[in-house]
Amino acid sequence: MPLFIGNEIYRRSSLGGKHPLAIPRVSTVMDLARSLGWLAPAKYRESHPASAERLQRFHRPDYVAAVRTAERTQTISAEDSLRYNLGRGGNPIYGTMFRRPATGVGASLMAAEHLLREGGIVYSPAGGTHHGRPAQASGFCYFNDPVLAILCLLDGGLGRIAYVDLDVHHGDGVADAFAADDRVLVISVHEAGRWPHSGGLDEEGRGNLFNLPVPPGMRDDEMFALIEGAIGPLVENFRPAALIMQCGADALADDPLAKQELSNNALWAAVRNLKSLSPRLLVLGGGGYNPWSVARCWTGIWAELNGLDKPDRLPPAAETLLRSLSWDRAAGRNPPEHWFTTLTDTPHHGPVRSAVRDLIRRVHERMT
């Protein structure tokens, strides 16, 4: 039975102002899944914040202390702001800046421990903060829950972990953490040339690191080709004891921070096609800055993990929930009707461009 890990902190907590993460995400997924009858109490677990000691398995003690102190005082010195990248670079000082990310880490650690004991599938949409560095916040990520989950699985005795990152931004924090570790397969599909301006083909050749930088405008057929021709074969050949998928929704066509053209069908297909390749699966969230596209996509992922059929038309309670959302952007002032009435996007078909075919060919060359 797949488990869903969540927490009410995401309903009460926001990065504030016009920050891209000021929108509701995890709480909306929880509510939408419940409105569809998909989240029975037996499938839900409440996460708890990771302790400073557990965070220090990857993050430096002085950095962990700095985040906790900044939350308590709501201030930070100019020196520490620069040193730890806090209060700058999209990483604001806000009321739950320690508790919120620590709760996300706690969920991923809870998931990893469950997978060690029982195997199966765990879903934590609050996870996926893949940019966090040992002693710096980066890209809205204060702590790096995928790294800590992988370390927990390795510490628990698993010898081979595969990590597949579908976020539009390169999963640089995870890639750098395991670049030279042959026990961890790291695959990142991301938009070429986009922040954090890493994940190029010239960064491969270390450990089991595979970068798949795609040009802007990727449509569903190109993601399907990457899954079938590159990602699936890599994971299957690696035979991981556990698979972690980061399913950031910011490569969807309606996201404001990228230039890709995926429908949510593409991410659902990735989950559907990869979930059977390991006896242990942890699915995380990640980026995604349109409240409707994130909620619909991530709720659909929960359906995929449970083998549930998605309704053509959402029931009234689900539609009411989606109509209650607001978004302080032009697209949010006049949202299309299907954002309220259905989970499923219209598929975005298109040719598989030569740049994508070249990535698949490169993967096969490295595998042989």
Image (tube, rainbow, N blue to C red):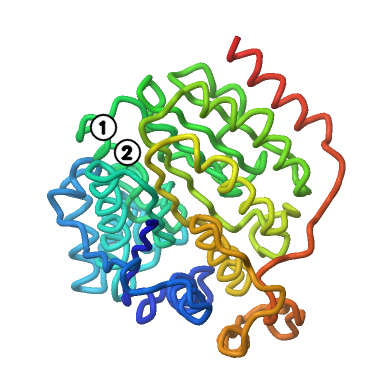
Say left or right for 240 vs 170. Answer: left
Q: Residue 247: x and y, percent?
A: 53, 52
Helix or strand or loop: what does disc 2 sit on? helix
The location of residue 331, given as percent across then percent down, is 72, 77
The quarter holding residue 106 reads bottom left
Q: Which residue is mark 1?
A: 154
Q: Position of residue 174 (x, y in %)?
A: 41, 38
Q: Residue reaching furthest left?
A: 53
- Residues 7 and 180: in front is 7
Residue pointed to by mark 2: 150
Where is 322 relative to 270, above or below? Answer: below
Q: Which numbered dot is residue 188?
A: none
Tell me the residue at 37%/36% (across/down). Answer: 242
Which three-letter amino acid code belongs to the residue tagged 2? Ile
Q: Amino acid at mark 1?
A: Leu
Q: Secondary structure at mark 1?
A: helix
Say if 216 sits above or below 364 in the image: below
Of 142 and 354, the residue lying toward us: 354
Along the line of sight, the residue nearer the viewer: 209 or 44: 44
Residue 188 left/right relative to 335: left
Residue positioned most to the top = 368
Q: Residue at x 23, y 66 (%)?
A: 70
